[in-house]
């Protein structure tokens, strides 16, 4: 499974890295540092990935089985 964070939707609420501390980190301004990225989630962190999806009030985080597509 892959996780993707839409940089245009992230407003820096900080809920995602609070519930998924092993998967996501914060930057100096309180935004999730991995915004704008898409990467494969280790199997043991899938629960945290889904919690991050559910926690984000902006709907900025998505988890899917689709592999990254080069633009
Ligand atoms: S919870 Fe959503 S809006 Fe807040 S930092 Fe995480 S991705 Fe951004």
Image (cartoon, helix red, strand yellow):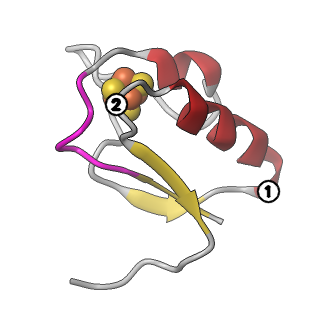
Q: Position of residue 53 (x, y in %)?
A: 55, 38
Q: Ligand 1 is located in which of the four quadrants?
A: top left
The question of residue 50 being in magenta is answered with no
Around disc 2, counting alpha carbons within 10 Å, would you say few (fewer than 14), some (14 to 19), or many (20 or more)? some
| In contact (CB < 8 Å): disc 2 and disc 1 | no
Residue at which label 2 appears: 58
Q: Earlier in the sequence, mark 2 or mark 1?
A: 1
Instruction: State which quadrant residue 61 falls in.
Output: top left
Q: Position of residue 65 (x, y in %)?
A: 62, 73
Q: Tag 1's secondary structure?
A: helix
Please give the name of the residue rendered at 21% of the width and 83% of the height, measured from the top-left corner: 71
Residue 18, numbered label? none
Instruction: State which quadrant residue 47 falls in.
Output: top right
Residue 38, placed above or below residue 21:
below
Residue 43, placed above or below residue 8:
below
Asked whether the viewer can see residue 32, the reply is: no
Outermost residue toward the bottom in this view: 70
Within 8 Å of ligand 1, the CB of disc 2? yes
Around disc 1, counting alpha carbons within 10 Å, would you say few (fewer than 14), some (14 to 19), or many (20 or more)? few
Residue at which label 1 appears: 43
Secondary structure, magenta segment, majority class: loop
Residue 50, placed above or below residue 62:
above
- 42 sits to left or right of 64: right
- 49 sits to left or right of 33: right
- Alpha-carbon distance for marks 2 and 1? 25 Å
Task: Report the span colored magenta.
Answer: 5-11
Q: Position of residue 66 (x, y in %)?
A: 54, 78
Q: Tag 2's secondary structure?
A: loop
């Amino acid at each position: 499974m892959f996780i993707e964070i839409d940089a245009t939707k992230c407003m820096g609420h900080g809920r995602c890295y609070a519930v998924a501390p092993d998967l996501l980190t914060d930057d100096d301004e309180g935004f999730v540092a991995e915004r704008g990225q898409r990467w494969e989630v280790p199997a043991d962190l899938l629960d945290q990935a889904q919690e991050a999806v559910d926690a984000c009030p902006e709907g900025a985080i998505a988890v899917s089985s689709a592999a990254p597509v080069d633009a």
